[in-house]
Structure formats: C-alpha cells, structure tokens
Amino acid sequence: MPQVLSPQVEMNLIGRKQYVPRRSLFETRMDILRAISEGSAKPTHIMHRSNTCWKILQENLQALKETGLVRQDTGSSDRIEYAVTEKGTEVVGDYLELLGSMEHRTIEAT
C-alpha cells in the first residue's frame, strides 16, 4: 500500500515518487487561457502567471491551438507569442461567469 508523504507526493510500492496533480486538466487549461487573455503573450510569462511548468505549458498550448482557442503569432522580435481567439474569449468569459455564479451560491448557502 502506498505511503502518503504529502498532499502532492506519494510513494509507490518500489519507492519512486508519483506526483498527484493539484488541478484538473480543465483547470490548468483555463488558467493558461486566463493568463493569455489578461495580457501575457510570451510563453515564459504565461507559464509563471498560470503556475505551470514548461512541459505542461507546451502540451496544453498545443491542445489549445488545436481546438482553436489560442493562436500562435510571431512578436516584434521574432519570438513566439500567443493570443486568445474569439472562440477562446467566449470560453474564458463563460468560465468566469460560472465561477462567479458558484461563488455567489456558496455565499448564499453560508
């Protein structure tokens, strides 16, 4: 049986660390979309603002591009930059609206 070391790390039967994600894939992608929509265009800025590591950021940016929520541009210094598409803006708006309504209902229930 695995021994729990912390909320994020568990030991498996042979002693290797297994990282337990703190956010769902959906939450991670929404955080990335929000970061871009709030003005972060460069990959490193997006990574810091969305609190993701480089590998996870790259995988999710690719998926967001493939679904048409983000587009890749070349900035003024020939560096890669990202922008949210119209479809992505709608998704972020719906997500924020949903979060707002959930927060409002939580306050009412208290």
Image: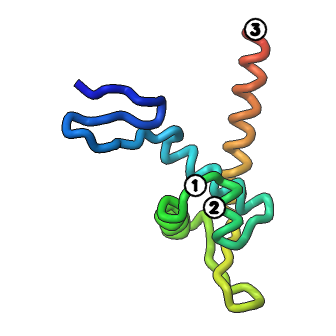
User: Which quadrant of the figure has residue 32?
Assistant: bottom right
**Point 73% across, 19% down: residue:** 105
Question: In the figure, 26 relative to 42: above or below?
Answer: above
Contact? badges 3 and 2 (CB < 8 Å): no
**Point 63% across, 61% down: residue:** 47
Q: Does residue 67 appear anywhere in the picture?
A: no
Residue 53, image x and y in percent? 54, 58
**Point 49% across, 68% down: residue:** 62
In the rendered picture of this protein, how many numbered marks are placed on residues? 3
Colour style of the rendered protein structure: rainbow
What residue is shown with label 1? Answer: 52
**Point 35% across, 42% down: residue:** 18
What residue is shown with label 2? Answer: 47
Residue 58 is left or right of residue 77, and the answer is: left
Contact? badges 1 and 3 (CB < 8 Å): no
**What's under tag 2, amino acid-wise?**
Met
Q: Nearer the viewer, residue 11 or 55?
A: 11
Q: Residues within 10 Å of mark 3 (few under 14, many from 20)?
A: few
Is disc 1 placed on a helix, strand or loop?
loop
Q: Which mark sits nearer the N-terminus, 1 or 3?
A: 1
Work out which quarter of the rendered image holds the C terminus and state it: top right
Residue 76, image x and y in percent? 77, 89
Is disc 3 placed on a helix, strand or loop?
loop
Contact? badges 1 and 2 (CB < 8 Å): yes
What residue is shown with label 3? Answer: 110
Residue 2, image x and y in percent? 27, 28
Question: In the figure, 20 relative to 110: above or below?
Answer: below
> From mark 1 to mark 2, how far is it between C-alphas?
5 Å
Observer-side mark, 3 or 2, equals 2
Residue 104, image x and y in percent? 78, 23
